[in-house]
Amino acid sequence: MKSPRPLLLAAVLGAAATAFAQTRPAPPAPPASAPAIGYPTVAAALQALQARDGESTIVTHSDDGWVIVNEPMASAQWSFTPKTHAAYPAVVRRIIRRSPDGDVAMDTASICEAPAAACAGLLKEFEALDERVLESARARAPRRPPMPPRPIPPAPPASAP
């Protein structure tokens, strides 16, 4: 089984560059009552995202069976496991977030319908990928110093009655 790392790394770095180019805030997190990933099943997520291909998403299929969906405006990447993967069926969604001081973080959510051990292994693979992507993004992005507090202007003198 081939590793999805080169394709995933290239796609995430592309999403990271898009994230840094944007000055708008990151998308809001889903409501607490919704599944963390926003879809009830892996199949539902794949169907919904593929239906938006070319509109707000870019869907690619790797030679080794991975389906990667990028959402550039949301700085998100969805990775669907191939049928040959131990954690099939599963999807991992990663969103790169940038704080006002320039630090970057990766929010990861997943749905895994495979046995628990296979799901844990998949998430461990992505944690390692996430760390490498974040290290690269941090090295490329200049950190902004925190904004100094603004001085409070003196109150106007009280007028005499």
Image: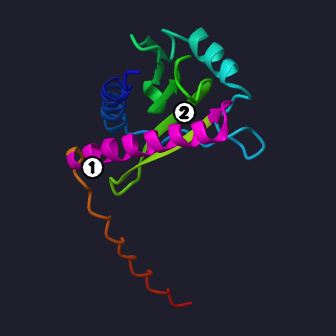
> Which mark, by number, is residue 73?
none
In this view, the mark in front (1 or 2): 2
* Residue placed most toward the observer, 102 or 96: 96
Residue type of the residue flagged with mark 2:
Val
* Image quadrant in which you'd find residue 161: bottom right
> Alpha-carbon distance for marks 1 and 2?
22 Å
Is 154 placed above or below 21 here?
Answer: below
* Image quadrant in which you'd find residue 28: top right
* Image quadrant in which you'd find residue 70: top left
Is 154 placed above or below 138 here?
Answer: below
Q: Is residue 155 left or right of residue 92?
A: left
Q: Is residue 158 left or right of residue 148?
A: right
Q: Is residue 56 left or right of residue 3?
A: right
Q: Please tell me whether residue 116 belongs to the stretch shown in magenta.
A: yes
- Find residue 58 and report its horizontal and vertical position in percent: 45, 15
> Which mark, by number, is residue 138?
1
Q: Please tell me whether residue 10 belongs to the stretch shown in magenta.
A: no
Residue type of the residue flagged with mark 1:
Arg
Query: Image quadrant for the N terminus?
Result: top left
SS class, disc 2: strand
Counting labels gives 2
> Which residue does the image show at 60% across and 9% down from the upper left?
51
- Find residue 9 and report its horizontal and vertical position in percent: 32, 31
> What stretch of residues is rendered in magenta?
111-139
- Residue annotated with mark 2: 92
- Find residue 118 and report its horizontal and vertical position in percent: 58, 36
* Residue placed most toward the observer, 52 or 21: 52
SS class, disc 1: helix
